[in-house]
Amino acid sequence: MTFKTKLLILALVPAVFAMVGCGGGGGDVYSPTVVDTAPPAVPFGLEIQAWDSGEVVLNWNVNTTDADFDGFKVYRVINRQMVELTTELSLINGFTDRSPVKDSLNEYRISAVDFTGNESGHAAISVFVGFQDDPSLDPSENGPSTPDEFNVGDKGSNSLGH
């Protein structure tokens, strides 16, 4: 083998590897890109409590379904206006609204978000928040708060059934 033949072989070997995808890249190798467009599961097991202190406490089940689960978002809807209450995703499966809209039906919506940013549908629950007219129920004068002193219910009712 002459020097020119060796040089030609050495020049052709990297070109062949590039064409078949071997070696340090640069070839036209097909590698499909998988794009995650599937949202995580909708949160479930949503429960709500309204306290006479004016706080509304939400709890729901932990997301154990989605390996790419990144966190929850919490929204409040008043008069068809939806406002996100969480400033960043939360891994905690509960939320306390310390400033619900008084004397109004407060609807809460919870969604799950994955690492790609896909957001699930919303789980929704509502509660009417309003202090009773009896001044003896003022929490500042009666010690600990209890949810029974509040009008609580879903969209179809406005009391605890007492």
Image: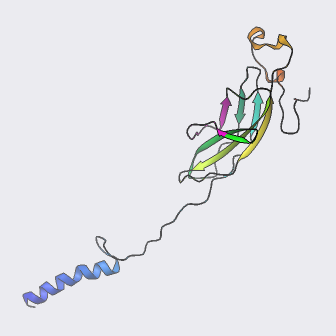
Q: Is 138 drawn above or below residue 21 in the view shown?
A: above
> Which is nearer the eye, 74 or 92?
74
Q: How far across and down, in percent of the image, does residue 105 sit?
A: 80, 34
Residue at the right extreme of this rendering: 162
> Which is nearer the eye, 130 or 14?
130
How many callouts does the rendering have? 0
Q: How far across and down, in percent of the image, does residue 9 sit?
A: 18, 86
Quarter the N terminus occupies: bottom left
- Asked whether residue 44 is in view, the answer is no
Quarter the C terminus occupies: top right
63 left or right, relative to 77:
left
Q: How far across and down, in percent of the image, does residue 44 sit?
A: 72, 45
123 left or right, relative to 71:
right
- Residue 85 in magenta? yes
| Start-end of magenta stretch | 83-97
- Asked whether residue 8 is in view, the answer is yes
